[in-house]
Image (tube, grey):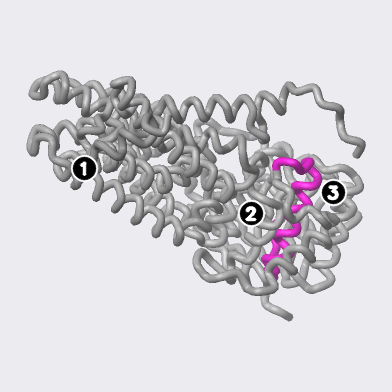
Amino acid sequence: MIEALFGPFAEFSFLRRALVGCLALSVSAAPLGMVLMLRRMSLTGDVLAHGILPGVAAGFLVGGVSVVALAAGGLAGGLAVALGAGALSRATGGREDASLAAAYLVALAFGVALVSTVADSVEVMALLFGSVLGVDDAALLLMCGVATLTLFVLAFAWRPLVLECFDPGFAAAEGARGGLWHLVFLALVVLNVVAAIAALGTLMAVGLLMLPAIAARHWAAEVAGIAKVAAGIGAGASVLGLLISYHADLPSGPAIVLAAGAAWAVSVGAGPVDSLLVRFARRRHLAG
Amino acid sequence: MAPPAIRIENLTVVHGRRPAVHHLSGSVAAGSLTAIVGPNGAGKTTLLRAIAGLHPPAEGRVSLAGRVALLPQAAALDRGFPISCRDVVLLGLWGRVGAFAPMPPDAAERAEAALAAVGLSGFARRPVGTLSAGQFQRLLFARLLLQDAPILLLDEPFTAVDARTAADLLAIIRRWHGEGRTILAVLHDLDLVRAEFPEALLLAREAIAWGPTEQALSAGNRLRARMMAEAWDDTAAACARDAA
């Protein structure tokens, strides 16, 4: 048992790197996912992750499997989709979800087409679904660097971000520059998704962003509590997912996301806030 | 005579190209208590948002003699948001504290006092999701208390609250009036307006009447306001009115 839990990490340095990187990203992605959820933008993370693929593919064409090339391409692609779709929808009469859906479908198809012309199927699988073998020193530095930067920026931007989520009208009336902070926030989301690509793949990178936050909603009643619980769930899912990936020989991305998904299932079923258990448990009502 | 708290000059605010507020001019005396009345779609909310600086005017200007605080329509907010009552009230300090400065040491006490003043003692740690519609409106009033602004814009403060809550909130408005603040409130209950608000603006995109409440809300004026609001010309040309 002990051997099954710790053995793989003790034995293989690539697993240790993947673990450290994923733990770092769990902490930084959790509050970002929470803000996305609270702004009813849960699907935006998905759109970003798909939008990143053509950029990553272009980076792959230019630089091969190099973290720098992949990250630069992904960053450009993700920001283009995030800002472009938003601007397009505002210019053409709302319906942001429609513009985002159109943009990400095209981006995903384009990216897969681009990658499959040059890469073999193993590389395509790694790019789409992640591979623990992909976490080299450069990828680890990227993950930890992004996590550090994210936490610093969030420490400064926490108050305006939460205000902009809760009451954008008040934020505007008080001159809180909600729009500016929102752009900073979107850039952080893209950075986190890009950093997670090596371990989770472009299609699964958003899992570590959204699932822990959505699960944590059922454990805490305030934003600070939700962010902390989400970080914990993300870290737990990272450890469990990497072990599953190692023992069951699965791609690491789906393994980690499935672990986070299990945490979500437990949370939505039995968490203390707004869960199915709370909804349907027949407990005697209180006296007052 | 004291300078007006709010001066509105030839203000036009549009949604698309359609004017929601059309060539409105006038002023609100400092320390006055004014009701804005008018049919749905008359531009009442848009006018408040324009005064608060949330909706840039297409033409004309608004000048203010002090800070404004806006009470938005409660229905516009996400009442299930995971935030405590105390934190919502503390948002009222934003104007002084901003995004980065630490909270003043007496912030928690002031939040507690504001909650007590609106009848929500002991609610500080409760999440807003547990509040009723009336309690949520009381909470927004507590935030206004902390904002401590000389000019207050209230958008339908008594909508969807019971008589008891309305009476309590009205008492707070009277207190603000007594303190010499300038208050502008969008209201639908004409009996309440006649009883409590000395001044009224009857709005139907343009000012139908603006002055002492009894004259402003005469039957003739109200009929004119209704006709104006219902008139909607699909073939309207660009407005050529002199931008005087």
N-terminal of the two: label 3 or label 2?
2
Where, quadrant-wise, is the C terminus of chain A in this rendering? top right
Give, as a three-letter code, the residue at label 3: Ser
Q: Nearer the viewer, mark 3 or mark 2?
A: 2
**Residue B77 shown left or right of residue A87 in the figure:** right
| Nearer the observer, A185 or B9 | A185
Q: Are marks 1 and 2 in contact (CB under 8 Å)?
A: no
Q: Which residue lies under the disc numbered 1?
A: A71
Query: Residue B48 got which mark?
Result: 2
For residue A200, say whether it is visible: yes
Chain of the residue displaying label 1: A
For residue B221, say whether it is visible: no
Query: Residue B218 got which mark?
Result: 3
**Which residue is painted at 74% across and 68% down in the image?**
B110
The range drawn in magenta is: B129-153
**Residue A180 shown left or right of residue A73 in the figure:** right
> In the figure, residue B132 lies in which quadrant?
top right
Give, as a three-letter code, the residue at label 2: Leu
